[in-house]
């Protein structure tokens, strides 16, 4: 499912291409690209749920967290997110790229990926996808892009 999300993000959202495709057209394109229907439906559902997160009354925590709330991860979240991932989430929150509400949206979408282990690269892309869908987050989105694309290469001696 994550590969489909990346495909959609890179080919539609990140490239600023026309993203108003019909559900059936999009499914057909993804099938032609080699993805299978169950995974396509999961990915499209994941995106729909992401869009609903910002408007949902069912998720009261989005507006309930104080600005500098500390996140205590559950045991299952710690199994899914390594120390590096949890540290990165804390780092980007501390430097103001995301706030506690967006952090919770990110954690929610990570859990919805249904992956036993999230890599740091997966985490960064999910953060970018979430920021793209949060109104008024253009500056944060551009900061996150810089973090992803301007990472220093390994030092050569």
Image: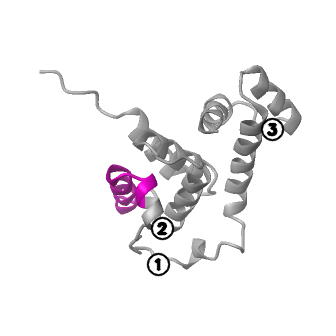
Residue at disc 1, secondary structure: loop
Looking at marks 2 and 3 on the same chain, the residue that comes earlier in the sequence is marked by: 3
Q: Quadrant of residue 28?
A: top right
- Which residue is drawn at the image coordinates 49% and 61% (left, top)? 103
Q: Report if residue 137 is visible in the image.
A: no
Q: Quadrant of residue 33?
A: top right
- State the separation of the CA atoms marked 1 and 2: 7 Å
| Position of residue 18 measured from the top left corner of the image (x, y, whole percent) | 75, 32
| Position of residue 73 measured from the top left corner of the image (x, y, whole percent) | 42, 67
| Labelled pair 1, 2 in contact (Cβ < 8 Å) | yes
- Which residue is drawn at the image coordinates 43% and 42% (left, top)? 119
Give the side of residue 14 with respect to residue 68, left or right: right
Frontmost residue, 111 versus 152: 111
Residue at disc 2, secondary structure: helix
Looking at marks 1 and 2 on the same chain, the residue that comes earlier in the sequence is marked by: 1
| Position of residue 95 measured from the top left corner of the image (x, y, whole percent) | 35, 58
Q: Quadrant of residue 19?
A: top right
- Answer above or below: position of 143 versus 152: below
Identify the disc placed on residue 100. 2
State the residue position of label 3. 20
């Amino acid at each position: 499912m994550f590969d489909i999300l990346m495909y959609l993000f890179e080919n539609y959202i990140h490239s600023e291409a026309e993203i108003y495709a019909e559900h059936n057209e999009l499914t057909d394109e993804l099938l032609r690209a080699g993805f299978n229907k169950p995974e396509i439906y999961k990915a499209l559902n994941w995106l729909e749920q992401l869009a609903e997160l910002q408007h949902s009354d069912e998720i009261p925590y989005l507006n309930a967290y104080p600005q500098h709330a500390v996140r205590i991860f559950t045991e299952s979240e710690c199994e899914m997110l390594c120390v590096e991932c949890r540290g990165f989430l804390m780092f980007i929150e501390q430097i103001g790229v995301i706030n506690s509400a967006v952090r919770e949206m990110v954690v929610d979408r990570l859990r919805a990926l249904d992956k036993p282990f999230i890599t740091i690269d997966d985490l960064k892309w999910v953060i970018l996808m979430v920021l793209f869908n949060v109104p008024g987050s253009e500056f944060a989105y551009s900061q996150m892009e810089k973090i992803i694309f301007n990472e220093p290469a390994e030092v050569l001696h």
